[in-house]
Image (cartoon, coloured by chain):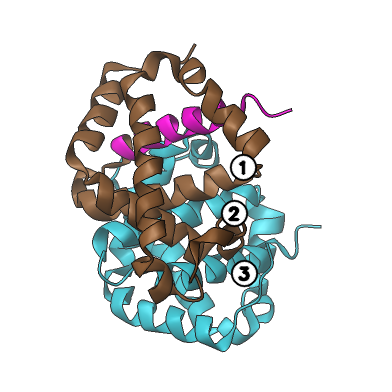
Chain colours: A cyan, B brown
Amino acid sequence: MTMSLTDKDKAAVKALWAKISKGADAIGAEALARMLVVYPQTKTYFSHWPDMSAGSGPVTKHGKKIMGGVALAVSKMDDLSGGLLELSELHAFQLRVDPANFKILAQCLQVVIAIMFPNDFTPEAHVALDKFLSNVALALSEKYR
Amino acid sequence: MVKWSDFERAAIQDIFSKISYDAVGRAALSRCLIVYPWTQRYFGSFGNLYNAAAITTNPKVAAHGKVIMAGLEKAVKNMDDIKTTYKDLSVLHSEKLQVDPDNFNLLGDCLTIVVAGQMGAAFTPEVQGAFQKFLAVVVASLRKQYY
């Protein structure tokens, strides 16, 4: 699904991000913890972690890292392919995460945002964020083959 | 046959005893029509769906949200044989309504988001897992009679 971002979408994502970015670390950690429980097949990428439970060191740290990537994507919204080039190479050549998982994590992020920011995650914000995360996933997949 | 753990069974019953069917039905369907606008193709007779405000206040959308929740309630009451319970509904969606079954997942995602928003922290990862398993079984049962 490569529906490109309109100016309206970009504005909506930036507006939502302004509201939620202070809680970014918590969102990332919670979304990651949730993904490992709801989609257990994703645990296969983290077999080197001693503890995969919510609130654990590795999950908290990695959730923060993921949101750093999302923040970067927000700042490079006008050129996601260029802006996320390095991250794409990382995912393609080193991490080799199956791209289907980007959609899974995006869903978990949105569930967490819905829980933590129910009044801000309106349908309008939801559609813009969903499109944005799909485009981020696409940019991350660019270098795979 | 689908096996439900005690936790999953309890979680599903708990969710459906706590949520407002009217509010959730209307919110989930409107969200689906807004976030995945191509789903509007099945609702040509609903009148004004031109923008988010129109969709969220459209009385036919609200009414249909109730219909959907009533359908889900049948599954909640017959968790051990949703497939048989949904046989006629599946035929309806396939033969008469001719809905592309991939759309069921889109509505399911919106239901998850809306229920999460309503339940807040009570919608734990484990509860989310149970709810999504329930939706997956519902979707599979609705797909069953398509050919």
Mark 3 lies on a secondary structure that is helix
Q: Which mark is residue B97?
A: 1
Q: Amino acid at mark 2?
A: Tyr
User: For mark 3, what is the residue?
Assistant: A135
Q: What's the distance in space between the residues labelled 2 and 3, CA to CA?
A: 27 Å
Q: Nearer the viewer, residue A95 or A79?
A: A79
Q: Is residue A45 above or below residue B140?
A: below
Chain of the residue where label 2 is placed in the rendered structure: B
Specify the segment rendered in magenta: B127-147
Q: Position of residue B31 (x, y in %)?
A: 42, 61
Q: Is residue B64 visible?
A: yes
Q: What's the distance in space between the residues labelled 1 and 2, CA to CA?
A: 8 Å
Q: Amino acid at mark 1?
A: Leu
Q: Pointers 1 and 2 in contact (CB under 8 A)?
A: yes
At 56% from the left edge and 83% from the top edge, which residue is drawn?
A76
Q: Which residue in the rendered view is the most extreme toward the right?
A: A145
Apparent side of residue A42 relative to residue B28 in the rendered image (left or right): right
Q: Amino acid at mark 3?
A: Asn
Q: Is residue B9 above or below residue A134?
A: above
Q: Mark 1 vs mark 3: same chain? A: no
Q: Is residue A23 above or below residue B32?
A: below
Queried whether the magenta region covers residue B140, the answer comes back as yes
Chain of the residue where label 1 is placed in the rendered structure: B
Queried whether the magenta region covers residue A84, the answer comes back as no
Mark 2 lies on a secondary structure that is helix
At 42% from the left edge and 54% from the top edge, which residue is drawn?
B29
